[in-house]
Amino acid sequence: MTVREAWDRRAGGLPREFWLVLVGSFINRLGTFVQPFLVLYLVRERGVSESTAGLLLAINGVAGLSSQIVGGVLADRLGRRETMLLGTIAFAGALGLLAVAESPAVLVAGVVLTGATADLYRPASSALVADVVPPRDRVRAFGLHFWVINLGFAAATSVAGLLAEHGYGLLFGLDALTTVVFGVVVFAFVGETRPERDDTTAPGRFTDPFTDRLMLGVIGSWFLYSCVYFQVFISLPLVMTADGLSLTVFGLVAGLNGLVIVVVQPLVLDRLNRLPRVETGAWSMTVVGLGFGLHGFADTGWQHAACVVVWTLGEIGATSVGSALVADISPAHLRGRYSGAFGFTFGAAAVVAPLVGTVTLEHVGQAALWTGCLVVGLAGAAVQLTLRDGVARRSTLTHEALAPPAPTHQVLPDSTA
C-alpha cells in the first residue's frame, strides 16, 4: 500500500469544514498550559493552602458540569459558529480574570468562570463535525479529532513547565490567545452548519437527551467507563508511590498513554470505521476494565506500563466510536444538546470517580479498587450491548451506508450565517 492509499483510507474524503475544526482544535490544545499547572498556580502564586486548592479545583469541576449542557443548547439555538466564538472568548476572559485575581472573592469567581466556560464550545464543535461528516465516516473523523487533541496536549504539557519558569502570566496569556484563535478560525472560515428546522419540529429543551431512554443508556455506559478511566489521575499515582515508585516513574508511565494513542490511533482508524459502533464500544470498555484490573498484579514501573498499554488500546476504540454513536442517534436539530449531554457524562464522572476511588483505596485496599475497575468496566460494556437494537432502529447509518457520500446539511455562505 502506498502512502497516498494509506492516507486516503484513514483521512481522505473528509470535508474542508472538518479540517478547519481539526486545525483549530490542534491550535487550541497546543496552548493548554493552565490546566496542568492550576493547582501549583493556586498554591505557589496565590498562596492558598493545599486543601483550599483542592476545594477550589472541586468547585471548578462542579461549575464545569453546566458548561457542556449550556453549550449544547446554545449550539442548537444560536448556531455552531456563534457558540464556538462565544465560548472561546468567554473562556479567554475567565482565564484573564483568574490570572489577575488578588482577593479571595475574585479568585473564586475566576475558578468558577473558568470551569463554567472551559467546555462551552465543545458541543458545538462535535455537532459541527456531525453536521458535515456523513455517518459512514464519523468514526474516522472523531478518531482523528481525538488524535489531534492528544498530540496538541502532549506538546503543550512538554513545554508548559519551561514557560512557567518565566511566570504564570505567560501561561495564562498564551492559553487565552490560542483559545480565541480557535474560535476565530471557525467563525471566519466555516459557514453555519446547523440543520434547518421546519415548522413541524419542536425547538427542543435542554432536558431532551435526559428523557431519551436510548441516550440515557449511552450516558450510563460511558459514565461507568469514565469512572474507571479517571483512576489514572486519581488512584494510580497513589498506588504507584505506595509501591515505592517515584513521581518521575509515574509521569513516564502515564505519558505512555499519549504516546500509544499518537502512534496507534492513525493505524486503526480505517478498521474502527468499518466495525459496528455498539459492539466496538462494548469490547473497548471491556479492554479498559481489564487493563485497569491488571494494575492489581503490578508492582514495578514496567508492569504498570504494560497495564497502561492494554487500557489505552481500549481507550482508542471507545473514544473513536463514542461521539459517532451519539451523532448517529441524535435528532439533527438537537445534536448540540445531545453532544452536551454526552460531555456532561465525563464531567459527572470526574466528580464521582475521585470520591469512590480514594475511599475504596483507603478503606478496602488496592485489590478491591482494581477488581472494582474490572467489574465496572464490564458493567459499562454490558449496558452498551443492551443498546444494540435501539441504535440499529434509530441510526441513519444503515439507510445511508449504500448511498453515495453526501453532506447531511447545507452549508450556508458566511454572509448569510
Image (cartoon, rainbow, N blue to C red):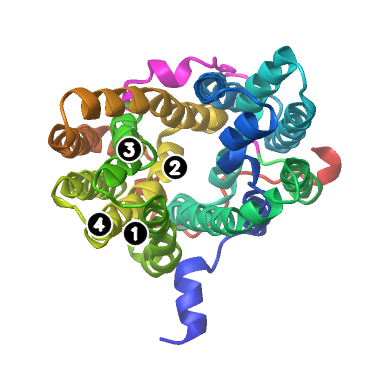
Q: CA distance from mark 2 to mark 3?
A: 22 Å
Q: Marks 2 and 1, how far apart in space?
A: 13 Å
> x, y (%) of residue 234?
36, 36
Q: Position of residue 355 (x, y in %)?
A: 34, 22
Can residue 198 be seen from the camera position used here?
no
- The region drawn magenta spans 194-217
Within 10 Å of disc 4 (Cα), the crowding (few <14, some 14-19, many 20+) is some
Q: Nearer the viewer, residue 100 or 324?
A: 100
Q: Which residue is mark 3?
A: 231
At x 44%, y 58%, the residue is 258
Residue sitting farthest toward the top: 105
**Amino acid bearing label 1:** Leu
> Which of disc 3 and disc 1 is earlier in sequence?
3
- Mark 1, secondary structure of its residue: helix
C-beta proximity under 8 Å, tags 4 and 1:
no
In the picture, the disc for residue 272 is 1
Residue type at mark 3 is Gln
**Relative height, residue 176 to residue 346 (above, below):** below
**Nearest the eye: 80 or 226:** 226
Pair 2/4: label in front: 4
Q: Which residue is mark 2?
A: 323
Q: Total label count?
A: 4
Q: Which residue is mark 4?
A: 310
